[in-house]
Structures are given as C-alpha cells and as structure tokens.
C-alpha cells in the first residue's frame, strides 16, 4: 500500500537549556507514489531534522507544529504507539552511517528477522528466505552465509547494501535514505547509486533521498527541495533546479560544486559568511546576510513563496515568475 | 578462542602460585613458630621438634611451598593441627554451604538487579527511575551484617518465620532453603543496588548508539530493544563487576556466616586464623583463590562469547 505524503507548515524546534533551537520552520513538501524526492542543503540546514520528523524519530526535546499527512493520516497527531507501528511497516529509514547502523553483537540475519516483526504471517524460516532473496537482490553474493555474519565482518559498502535490503524487506510505502552514500568511498558511492537507480524502477512507493552531494541528487531524483537554515528555499523538478535555479542560495550552491567546473581551479569557490543562529532566526530572509542580491525588504520582511511554474517554487523577494 | 582460554588459565595458575608464596612469606614473618602456639608454652622440646618435623617447618620456605603444591596436586592439603583430620575433608564439608550461599545471593541479586536497571532505562526521568536510583544507593550503603542482624531480629525472633541459626537439617531441602533465605538476602541486598546502577549506567550509554535508532526506525517495541539489543552490550561491564565482586561476596559471607552461626568457609577460616591452625588457613586460602580465579576466567570467556568483536581479537 502506498499513498501520498504532504508536510504542510511543518516546524520543529528543540528545547535546550540555552533556549529553543528552531531547526525547521514552515516547511511545505509533497511527494507522490513512484516519485524520488531529493533534499539537499549544507550541514545543519535541517534536512536531517525534516526526515527524522517524517519517520517520527525526533528526540524527546523536539516540539513539532504543522502537519505531516501520509495517506490521509496526520502522523504528527498519532500517539507514540501508533507511530511506532508505522515505522518498519509503512515507513522505513536507511540510516546515515552503515558502519554503526547495526547492532554489533547480533548477526545480520538475526536483526533482519526482527525488523520484519510486522509480518506476523511469516515464520522464522520464511523470514530468513526473504532476507536471502533480498540480500541477493541488492547484490550481496553468498547471501545465505552472509546472514550469519556479524556487522563488523562486512565491508562498509556491503553494510549499506544490507541497510537498503533491511528497509526494502518491510515493503514500505515511504523509503527514506538519509545520506546513503556519505560514509562510503567514491567507488562504493557509485555502486550504491547504481543500486538505488535500479531499485527505483521496480519500486512503487515514495523514495526520499537526503544528501549534501548535488551529484547524488541529480542522478537519483525527480524533484528536489533545497534547504537553508531550516527552510525550504527552492523546490522543483530536478532539471529546473540544476539548469534554471532562481534562488540566489541555490545558484551559489551550484556554483560551488566542484563536479561542475570545466577546468582545475587554484581555489575552490565558497559562499561567504555563515548560516544564521537558529536560536534567534532572522525576521526577514534567512539568506539575506550572505546574499549578493539582497535589498532593503530582505532584511526585515520574510520573503513569500513565489510560484515560478506548476512545480517550481522559490522563497525570495528578488525572483519573479 | 582456545588460545585465549589457554592464556587466561595459565595466568590464573600463576596467580595461585603467587598467592601461596605470599601466604608462606606471611607465616614466616609472623613472630612465634606455629608449633609453640599449637602445643602451648609448657611442651617439651622433643615434642616440639617432632611436630616441627611433621609439619615440615624445619625445611627452607621455598621447599615448603614446593611440597605444598606437590601434595595439593594429589589432593592432600595437609592436616588440621588440632584434630589431625585432613584439611581437604574440612574444606569439602564447609565449601558447599558457602558456595550455595554465595551463588544464591548472586543469582537473586542478578535476577532482581538487572530487570530493575532495565526498567530504570525504559522509564528514564520518571518517578520510578528516581525511586530505583535512591533505593539502589540506600541498599549499597547498608553493610550486610547490619541487614543480617536486623532481619534476624524481625523474621526469626519477633515473627518466628525463619530459623535463626544453622544451615538446616541435613537431607531436608525445605529446612535448608528456609535457613538460606536470610543469609542470602543479607548478602544480595547491596548487590541488587550495585547491579541495578551498573546496568542502568551502561545501558543509558548503549541506548544513545546509532544501532538503537535503527532498531527504533523499524518500529521494534521498546522492551525488545532494551532486553535484546541493548542488554547484550550493556551487561558486559556488569559481568566484570560481578566476577570481581564475588571476592567481596565471599568475604561478606564470613560476617554473615558468623551472625547466623552457619557452617561454612567463612567460619572455618576465622576459627583457623584465631588458633594459628596454619595448614587449615593455607588449604582454605588455596581453594578460595582457585574458585576466585576460575570465576574471573569464566567471566572473561563469557564476555568473549557475548561480544563477537572481543572473540575476533583473540582468534588465531
């Protein structure tokens, strides 16, 4: 079963002894079955908070406002037990670091059997044969024997494949891959991207890929949301974002991607300045202090979400449709 | 794993030898020779010489140690100076009582302490967590002989539910079990607190690790995450603590056996020390050290069994 996902006016803040950190502010995103959605932004922009909120895994000090509608149900309003029952059934998360994602003292097979706990109709032997088939599917040779390995006996790339297999085993309507290739070397990264590309052809649910790596997003996704300082600053089809970026931040981000340079540079370009302090988010545009096109209203008035085409939006005073 | 076991056992044997050397050195340094103490001040020199020869005290100390180990290998730990009975027989009579007491206390402490620690983690920050925390510190602070004396007053003297002294009738399991309740509880109480705190502390750390988030992201119920995914890692420091603590459990058995007049190693060794009954002291210390060393080795092997990463370090 799979349905659409829509987060509207979603805000998350973390209560800390030094005041509240507004990690996510007024975020609107949507995704439909069969789509691959990319979320891109630099470290600390709120992309991990966003997917953690979607997976209902926020820590106890997080306060959530707005709604996350999945399949017509507002996830943010469900009680903890109902949320737990959705995880590993309708919603699966492929975690960030495959090196530490699995329990070190239990075998892979043992953990993957447990992760299928929603399938009360299957016995242990059936669950194990599903695991073997899925490990084989994600490109792990000798799957039967690998099941009895402990995580530290597998390489990083293999563990990431196991993590993807674990998520797919639950047959989720919403698959979230949080930085799926960040902890891997380039060769492994290419292999995992290849695997994810293959999977998306057979998979009917929603896939959300989070990355700070523009190349990964460009290769995998249909639509992209660009995040900055807890806000979605631009969103649209992958072509529109990569070839017709309108928000100054997206343009600056693309200009800094080394993969897009045609010749070797002496110094890598950077965006001057630092992201704002999220304990006291600015009243105007969050990007204004670093923006080279900022003018008077940018500092004091929050920019509107400007609709540039049916799917392309940007939150900026300087853009016009 | 085998190489690891052999290494640990070899080290254990070395510890046994060192402990006995230290014991002999202590006897050698204490003023007054054991024969005079044993026979009293008015013994004839002939009689004294006879006893000294029989106990081998005229030999050099290193030779006495070699002889002791040679005899120990054949099961002969020497003879009681007073009753002339073999020390091995005395130890074998007393040992089961002490072992049953120590192991029952330990089992009770683990069976209550570990679940309390887990409960504390599952209910962290709530009233239940705070109550368990305060009670744990409370029971650790109370010495076991105090628990022994007060439980004696309440349950044996006032309520008359449980026998005050002894280890129960031979062959009667019910009376033996009744006699075990108070001494075991006296020893276990503090350990419940230690174990609950230890399990809570190490489990809190494990619960912050990314693999616990993975288990949560698959919607596993919290009790299963705690009891299977976290406990298997968090229990490891507790096993080391309990193995080392067994020494203190056996030494608190000395007081508790004294309070309840319960026959056992504790009573045997205190009596032997008071009467300078050296062969009994030596034999008992050897057996206790051997038990202590074996438990430490068993704990190390159990840890290697529980954690595949430790197992791999020692493989090959």
Image (cartoon, coloured by chain):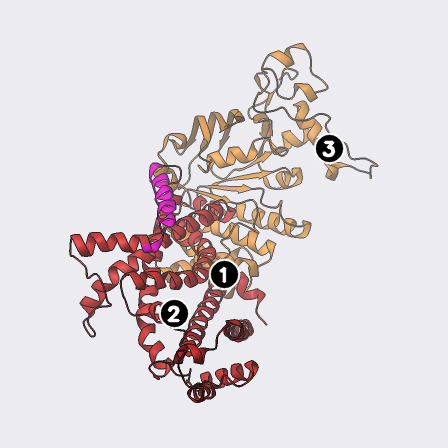
Chain colours: A orange, B red
Is residue B156 shown in magenta?
A: no
Q: Are marks 1 and 3 on the same chain?
A: no
Mark 2 vs 3: CB contact within 8 A: no
A171, above or below B256, in the image: above
In the orientation shown, which residue stands out farthest toward the right?
A: A266
Residue B307's disc is 1
- The C terminus of chain B lies in quadrant: bottom right
Q: Residues within 10 Å of mark 2 (few under 14, many from 20)?
A: few
Q: Residues within 10 Å of mark 3 (few under 14, many from 20)?
A: some
Q: Secondary structure at mark 2?
A: helix
Residue A297 screen position, x and y as percent: 64, 10
**Chain ID of residue with mark 2:** B
Q: CA distance from mark 1 to mark 3?
A: 45 Å
Residue B255 screen position, x and y as percent: 34, 61
Which is in the foreground here, disc 2 or disc 1? 2
Q: Which residue is mark 3?
A: A256
The span picked out in magenta is B122-145
Q: CA distance from mark 2 to mark 1?
A: 46 Å
| Residue B213 in the figure: left or right of residue A233 | left
Mark 1 vs 3: CB contact within 8 A: no
Residue for point 58% across, 42% down: A179
Q: Secondary structure at mark 3?
A: loop
């Amino acid at each position: 079963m799979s349905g659409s996902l829509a987060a509207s006016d979603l805000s998350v803040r973390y209560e800390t002894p030094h005041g509240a950190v507004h990690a996510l502010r007024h975020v609107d995103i949507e995704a439909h079955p069969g789509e691959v959605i990319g979320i891109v932004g630099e470290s600390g922009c709120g992309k991990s908070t966003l997917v953690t909120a979607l997976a209902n895994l926020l820590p106890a000090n997080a306060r959530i406002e707005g709604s996350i509608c999945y399949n017509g149900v507002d996830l943010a309003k469900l009680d903890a037990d109902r949320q737990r029952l959705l995880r590993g059934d309708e919603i699966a998360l492929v975690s960030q670091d495959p090196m530490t994602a699995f329990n070190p003292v239990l075998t892979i097979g043992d953990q993957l059997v447990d992760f299928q706990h929603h399938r009360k109709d299957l016995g242990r032997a059936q669950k194990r044969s599903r695991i073997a088939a899925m490990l084989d599917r994600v490109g792990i040779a000798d799957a039967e024997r690998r099941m009895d390995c402990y995580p530290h006996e597998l390489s990083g790339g293999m563990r990431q494949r196991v993590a993807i297999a674990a998520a797919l085993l639950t047959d989720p309507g919403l698959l979230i891959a949080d930085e799926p290739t960040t902890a891997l070397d380039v060769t492994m990264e290419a292999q995992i991207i290849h695997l994810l590309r293959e999977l998306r052809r057979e998979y009917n649910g929603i896939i959300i890929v989070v990355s700070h790596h523009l190349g990964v997003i460009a290769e995998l996704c249909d639509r992209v949301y660009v995040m900055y300082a807890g806000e979605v600053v631009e969103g649209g089809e992958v072509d529109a974002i990569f070839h017709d970026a309108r928000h100054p931040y997206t343009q600056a981000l693309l200009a800094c991607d080394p993969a897009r340079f045609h010749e070797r540079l002496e110094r890598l370009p950077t965006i001057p300045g630092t992201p704002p302090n999220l304990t006291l988010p600015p009243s105007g545009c969050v990007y204004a202090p670093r923006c080279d096109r900022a003018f008077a209203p940018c500092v004091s008035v929050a920019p509107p979400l400007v609709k540039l085409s049916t799917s392309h939006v940007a939150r900026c005073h300087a853009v016009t449709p | 794993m085998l190489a690891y076991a052999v290494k640990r056992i070899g080290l254990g044997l070395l510890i046994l030898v060192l402990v006995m050397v230290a014991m002999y050195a202590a006897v050698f340094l204490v003023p007054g020779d054991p024969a005079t103490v044993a026979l009293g001040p008015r013994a004839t020199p002939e009689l004294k010489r006879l006893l000294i020869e029989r106990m081998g005290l005229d030999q050099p100390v290193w030779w006495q140690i070699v002889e002791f180990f040679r005899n120990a290998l054949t099961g002969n730990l020497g003879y009681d100076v007073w009753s002339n009975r073999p020390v091995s027989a005395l130890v074998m009579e007393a040992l089961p009582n002490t072992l049953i007491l120590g192991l029952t206390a330990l089992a009770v402490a683990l069976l209550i302490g570990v679940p309390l620690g887990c409960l504390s983690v599952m209910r962290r920050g709530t009233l239940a967590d705070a109550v368990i925390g305060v009670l744990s510190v409370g029971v650790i602070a109370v010495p076991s002989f105090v628990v022994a004396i007060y439980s004696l007053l309440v349950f044996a003297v006032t309520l008359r539910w449980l026998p005050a002294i002894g280890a129960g009738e031979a062959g009667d399991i019910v009376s033996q079990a009744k006699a075990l309740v108070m001494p075991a509880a006296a020893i276990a109480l503090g350990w419940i607190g230690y174990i609950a705190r230890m399990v809570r502390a190490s489990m809190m750390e494990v619960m912050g690790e990314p693999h616990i988030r993975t288990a949560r992201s698959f919607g596993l119920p919290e009790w299963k995450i705690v009891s299977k995914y976290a406990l298997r890692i968090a229990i490891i420091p507790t096993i080391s603590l309990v193995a080392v603590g067994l020494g203190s459990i056996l030494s608190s058995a000395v007081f508790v056996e004294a309070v309840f007049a319960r026959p056992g190693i504790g009573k045997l060794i205190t009596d032997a020390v008071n009467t300078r009954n050296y062969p009994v002291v030596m034999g008992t210390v050897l057996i206790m050290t051997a038990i202590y060393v074996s438990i430490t080795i068993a704990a190390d092997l159990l840890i290697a069994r529980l954690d595949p990463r430790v197992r791999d370090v020692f493989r090959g």
